[in-house]
Amino acid sequence: MELTRFIGRQREQGLARDALRRSRLVTLIGLGGVGKTRLALEVASAAEGAFDEVCFARLADVLEPALLGHTINTALGVRERSARWQLETVVEFLADRRVLLVLDNCEHLVDAVASLADSLLRSCPGLTVLATSRQVLGLDGEVAVRVPPLSIAASADRDQDGESDAVLLFLDRAQAAVPGLAVTPEEREQIAELCRLLDGIPLAIELAAVRLRLLPLGELVARTADRFRLLTQGSRTAPPRHQSLRASIDGTYELCTPQEKELWARLSVFSGGFTLGAAETVAADASAADSVLDLVAGLVDKSIVTRVLQAGEPRYAMLETIRQYGAERLDDEQLDELHRRHREWFAALATRADEEWSGPDQVGWLARLRADYPNLRVALQSCLAHDPRLGMRLAVGIENFWLAAGFLSEARTWLDSLLTADPAPSVERGRALRLGAWLAVLQNDHAVVPGLLEEASRIAAATDTPVLAAYVEQAWGLLAMFQGDLATSTARLEAAVQDFSRLDHLTGEIHTMFELGIAHGFAGDVDRAVEWQQRCQELAGRVGESWWRSFSLWAYGIDLWRQGDVAGAEEVQRETLRVKRALDDRLGVGVCLEAMSWIAAASGDPVRAGRLMGAADTVLRQVGMPIEASHSMFDYHREAQEVLRPDDRRVEAAYGEGAAWDVDTAVRFALGEADPTASSAPASAAGERGDATRLTRREQEVAELVADGRTNREIAAELFISVRTVEKHVDHILGKFGLSNRVQLAARMARDGDDG
């Protein structure tokens, strides 16, 4: 009988129970310390009524395969007839019995357990085996149920303020370790962070809870960076593998082949996951490059590496605890070499993204760069220390990602650091200076721009790099546009378009056509503005480019508005916003919302205009481009404010509502997909039922999975979307229904289901 309370695992229990109904061999697979044994005990206990007997065989201390049969005999209560174990004796004993046999900790005897289980299951029709292991047994008919770390996100199946299972486990064990422990709301946030840092691994959380006897919570959180020294001193009665976090992972490490151990260590150079191609190039030993696929498969089978589908391709990830364990096994020389390969791989990835940008796979490239964002940061840091010029190439190669993700300030920080680290003139430096100037224009930091562009121009001339010279000319034109000098802007941008066209540089030509068109529009020459935007869209459409084409469409919508075609302008902006949402382009979303606020003001809808203006202001400031950075856009903004002035009070309230929305809520409002203000007041039961019908198809799917007890990560995996997107959907659903947590949402969905 277990002496501690079982926490969470509703989903895994359900999967295991369902598997036992379908198969006579079920294996709970997971990392050491993840809670497989405890889960097996719960599942077996719940299944007792379906069997004559439930027997439990602990195999952790069985070191010799020859002792396996005797251990199972003891668990079953079989009286042995000879010194040698005999299969026939067990088969005869089980002949007319319906028995659930739990084989706990099979990984170190996996071949022997698989052979014996296969023989018993074939000979004993009433026998069912529930195994726990760090790797599958590999038998026909086996159903493997993966046991992940505990949920870190708030759980809908707990009636305790929606606390995650990981937090609930920590609180339970902490209150046992420190009787009378009281936790403040601020400390609950620290506990949630602690559980996140410990990857939701139950053993790590339990060991951390015991440390509260010695350390205050804040220091405990700080010390997780050295988790293997911190998390020791387990229960005296616990098996050795549960005495410390390191001992638990040691057990998994010993299951690996020498080649798997080596790859595990090498993969620790990645941050946030990796593709198979990256692993083959960066982490493979020269003599084992062809075998990386098989080695990764072995690490997946042992729950060391997890396979996920992200950015439209299979990727692999390791928990931070597992990554740190592997990293400890690298010496300085190995680490230096791996970091060199890592930064070169991701610099090459950035170059490919840049070269292939003007094509049909822009959405795919943005998704790929977002997925590898942690690796890109690691690579930039490595470049800063060892190869700043390569870092400049990397930072410039992902310039459109910086904009789409809203990381303008971060991009400038990297560029400034890299430029300081390597002041020697080079093409890479010239490109970095130009990008830094362009971002500074967008961020209204215009004073620094001339110096950056003048140096970039000198480098372009000295190195005979006409593409760089064209980009410098373009940046001068953009600076003039943002400062309101539209005559200079149109002249310089037209020169840049001609240069890019002569050089057959599609990305530069499409980008500059858009800017030239909008400069003409700001100057009041709408006919020429429309002409250039149409040329931009035609060229972009011919090659499948959607990024700058969508910006051009946005500018065309503004031109229609200036011509008085309010309805046409609104439709074009909606079309643009849909594209920007698909690209997850934060900057593009912000300028669309701003333009739509001008259109709403012209349409005589002050409340809608105020909400859109507030939402746009929030988004644009988040990405680092305030509206006042552009002289002409700010003029339009102030014109709209003048139109709205008679409705100041209503507009001010509406502005506050819009400013409080997240990006997705604002987009859905702008597109007419939902009214975020509809659930702001308490609703009646009938009204609540009506709200449910306003969920989109995706929101309905997410809500149902939340009600089923799924974590955000599990929902993301099932629906093939990012965890961040799931979090947004959950927030929107809660907002629509006027709810405060997932527990209330689960109850709401259950009630709606009953009503339906």
Image (cartoon, rainbow, N blue to C red):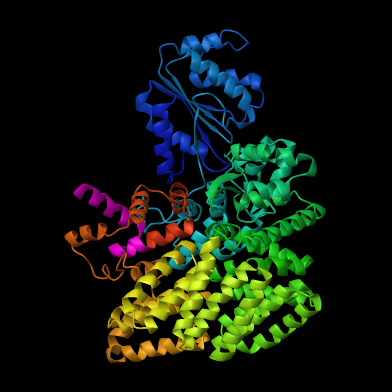
Residue at left offset 77%, top offset 58%: 340
Task: Name the spot of residue 366 as percent of width and height, x first.
Answer: 55, 61
Q: Position of residue 421 (x, y in %)?
A: 77, 74
Q: In this rendering, would 342 be left or right of 233?
A: right
First to last magenta residue range: 732-756
On the picture, is 583 further left or further right than 698? right
Q: Is residue 746 magenta?
A: yes
Quick one: quadrant of the N terminus?
Answer: top left
Q: Residue at x 67, y 41 (%)?
A: 250
Q: Compared to 390, does 276 lie above or below?
A: above
x%, y% of residue 470?
67, 77
Does 333 appear in magenta?
Answer: no
Q: Is residue 670 above or below residue 207?
A: below
Q: Nearer the viewer, residue 546 or 744?
A: 546
Up the image or down, 650 lies above or below 245; here it is: below
**Snapshot quadrant of residue 526:** bottom left
Dominant secondary-structure state across the stretch colored magenta: helix
Q: Quadrant of residue 208?
A: bottom right
